[in-house]
Image: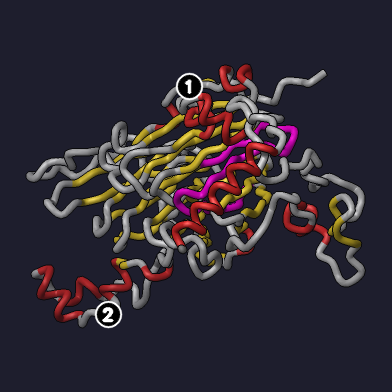
C-alpha cells in the first residue's frame, strides 16, 4: 500500500510538471545569479595628508561626523580606517605599525627602534629594527638566536663576521644593498665615512617575538665573567683587562674604518658564501605600472631564510591582486603612499593606509593588492621568511583556468576573459579610460 502511494505521488508530480508552462532555459554562457551583483558604488580613498578639510567618519550615506576629540593628523594619514571602503567587513588584526611610534633607544653615536609582536601582534613570523649610526660608530660585536637580514637605507656600512668553522668575512655595502648573517654567527656593523651623515639601515629577523634589546653582546658577556676567568681564557695577565667596560656598549663612537680595510689573514680561509649582496646593482624588471627586483637564495646563496622583492608603483598603478602560498609578508615603505586591503577569507577584509617609515604585515595566503594613492612613485619592500620568493597572481590564475569555468563564477564576457594575461603582471598601470 505504501509503495502504491509513493508511485501515485510520483505520477502526480510528473503530470503537474508536464502541464506547467516550460520555464526558459539558462544557457551556460549566461548563468543565473544566485546572489546579488556587486555594487558599483565607488570606494576611493576619500582624503590624504594634504587635504585641508577635517576628515569625517562618513562614506556615502553611512556614518556621521566626529563631534568628540579627534587626532586629525592620524585621521588624515588613515582615511580607510576612519571611513573604510564598503567592501571591508569582519575582523582582521592591525597590519600597520609606524616606526615613528616605536620607542627609540638613543646611544652616543646612533639609535635603534624596533617593531615586533609587542606592538603588532599579527606579525608572528618576522620583526624589524630601524638603526642609525654616525660616521665611525659601531654596533658592537654580537650575535643572535635568529637570522639577520638587512637593507641599507642611506650611507654605507662595513660588516665583519666569523663563522662556526673559524672562517672570517669583511665587506662594505651601500644604499640599496643587503647583508645576511645566519643565527649564531658573531658579527659587527660600522658606519663608513663615505657619507658625511654615516648610515641608516633596516634589519629584519625571522621571529616575530625578536627583541633588539636581547641580543648577545661581547661587552655584556665579559662584564659578567670574573676577570680571573677571562685572563685564564686568553692566557694573559689579569691586568690586561683593567679597562674593559663594566656594562654593554651596544652602539658607540669610533674612528671610521679605512676604505681599503682587509679581513685578518686566516689559516681557515674566508667564508664560502659572501654575507653581503649588491642589490643596488641588480637591474629592475620594467613593468607597465612600475618595477620589481627579487633577491633570494638563488642569487644571494647565504640568505637561506629570507627573500625580498623591491617594488616601485607609479601614480595610478597598483601591485596586482595576489597572495603568497605559505609565507607571511613583512613590508617596509620607503617612499610614496599606499593602501592595502587584506582579504582573510570567510568574509573578512580590512583596508590600511601606509606612509614612508611604516611597517605592513600580511599573513600567508591572505589576498591583497598594494595601490599607489599619491602623486609620487610608491617604493616599498616585500620581505618573506623563505629561501625562494613565491606569489600567485589572480589574473594569471583566471587566464589559465577553463574560460567557461571563469564565466560561470564571474559573469565576465568572452572578450574580457580572452584578454586576461597568462603571465604575471606584478605591477599594473592605471585602468584604461572608459570614455
Tell me the magenta residue range: 356-381
Which class describes the residues within 10 Å of circle 2: few (<14), some (14-19), or many (20+)?
few
Residue highlighted by disc 1: 422
Task: Residue 44: tell me if it is visible.
Answer: no
Checking the image for residue 404, the label placed there is none
Give x and y (percent) for residue 309. 46, 37
For the residues carrying marks 1 and 2, which lies nearer the camera in this image? 1
Mark pair 1, 2: CA separation: 61 Å
Answer yes or no: do the residues labelled 1 and 2 have beta carbons within 8 Å?
A: no
Give x and y (percent) for residue 307. 38, 42
Residue name at image x 39 percent, y 38 percent: 390
Comparing 82 with 365, the one in front is: 365
Residue highlighted by disc 2: 224
Q: Is mark 2 on a helix, strand or loop?
A: loop
Comparing 340 with 159, the one in front is: 340
1 or 2: tag closer to the N-terminus? 2
Q: In the shown orientation, is residue 354 left or right of residue 203?
A: right
Residue 342 lies within the magenta run: no
Residue name at image x 42 percent, y 40 percent: 308
Which class describes the residues within 10 Å of circle 1: few (<14), some (14-19), or many (20+)?
some
Residue 380 lies within the magenta run: yes
Comparing 202 with 222, the one in front is: 202
Amino acid at each position: 500500500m505504501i509503495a502504491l502511494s509513493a508511485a501515485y505521488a510520483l505520477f502526480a508530480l510528473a503530470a503537474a510538471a508536464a502541464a506547467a508552462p516550460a520555464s526558459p532555459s539558462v544557457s551556460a554562457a549566461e548563468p543565473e545569479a544566485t546572489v546579488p551583483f556587486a555594487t558599483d558604488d565607488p570606494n576611493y580613498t576619500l582624503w590624504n595628508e594634504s587635504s585641508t578639510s577635517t576628515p569625517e567618519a562618513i562614506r556615502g550615506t553611512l556614518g556621521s561626523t566626529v563631534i568628540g576629540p579627534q587626532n586629525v593628523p592620524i585621521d588624515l594619514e588613515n582615511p580607510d580606517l576612519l571611513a573604510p571602503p564598503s567592501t571591508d567587513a569582519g575582523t582582521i588584526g592591525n597590519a600597520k605599525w609606524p616606526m615613528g611610534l616605536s620607542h627609540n633607544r638613543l646611544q652616543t653615536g646612533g639609535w635603534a627602534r624596533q617593531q615586533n609582536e609587542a606592538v603588532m601582534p599579527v606579525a608572528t613570523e618576522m620583526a624589524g629594527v630601524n638603526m642609525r649610526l654616525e660616521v665611525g660608530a659601531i654596533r658592537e660585536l654580537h650575535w643572535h638566536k635568529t637570522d639577520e637580514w638587512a637593507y641599507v637605507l642611506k650611507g654605507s656600512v662595513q660588516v665583519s663576521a666569523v663563522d662556526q668553522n673559524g672562517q672570517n668575512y669583511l665587506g662594505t655595502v651601500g644604499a640599496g644593498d643587503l647583508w645576511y648573517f645566519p643565527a649564531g654567527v658573531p658579527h659587527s656593523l660600522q658606519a663608513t665615512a663615505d657619507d658625511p651623515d654615516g648610515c641608516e639601515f633596516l634589519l629584519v629577523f625571522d621571529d616575530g617575538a625578536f627583541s633588539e634589546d636581547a641580543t648577545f653582546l661581547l661587552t655584556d658577556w665579559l662584564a659578567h665573567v670574573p676577570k680571573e676567568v677571562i685572563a685564564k681564557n686568553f692566557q694573559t695577565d689579569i691586568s690586561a683587562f683593567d679597562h674593559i667596560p663594566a656594562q654593554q656598549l651596544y652602539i658607540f663612537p669610533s674612528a671610521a674604518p679605512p676604505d681599503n680595510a682587509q679581513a685578518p689573514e686566516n689559516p681557515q680561509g674566508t667564508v664560502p658564501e659572501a654575507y653581503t649582496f649588491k642589490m643596488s646593482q641588480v637591474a629592475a624588471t620594467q613593468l607597465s605600472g612600475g618595477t620589481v627586483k627579487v633577491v633570494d637564495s638563488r642569487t644571494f646563496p647565504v640568505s637561506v631564510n629570507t627573500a625580498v622583492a623591491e617594488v616601485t608603483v607609479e601614480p595610478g598603478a597598483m601591485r596586482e591582486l595576489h597572495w603568497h602560498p605559505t609565507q607571511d609578508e613583512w613590508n617596509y615603505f620607503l617612499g610614496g603612499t599606499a593602501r592595502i586591503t587584506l582579504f582573510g577569507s570567510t568574509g573578512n577584509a580590512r583596508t590600511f593606509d601606509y606612509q614612508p617609515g611604516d611597517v605592513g604585515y600580511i599573513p600567508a595566503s591572505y589576498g591583497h593588492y598594494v595601490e599607489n594613492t599619491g602623486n609620487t612613485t610608491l617604493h616599498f619592500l616585500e620581505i618573506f621568511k623563505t629561501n625562494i620568493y613565491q606569489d600567485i597572481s589572480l589574473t594569471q590564475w583566471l587566464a589559465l583556468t577553463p574560460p567557461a569555468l571563469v564565466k560561470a563564477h564571474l559573469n565576465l564576457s568572452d572578450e574580457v576573459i580572452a584578454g586576461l594575461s597568462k603571465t604575471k603582471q606584478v605591477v599594473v598601470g592605471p585602468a584604461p579610460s572608459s570614455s
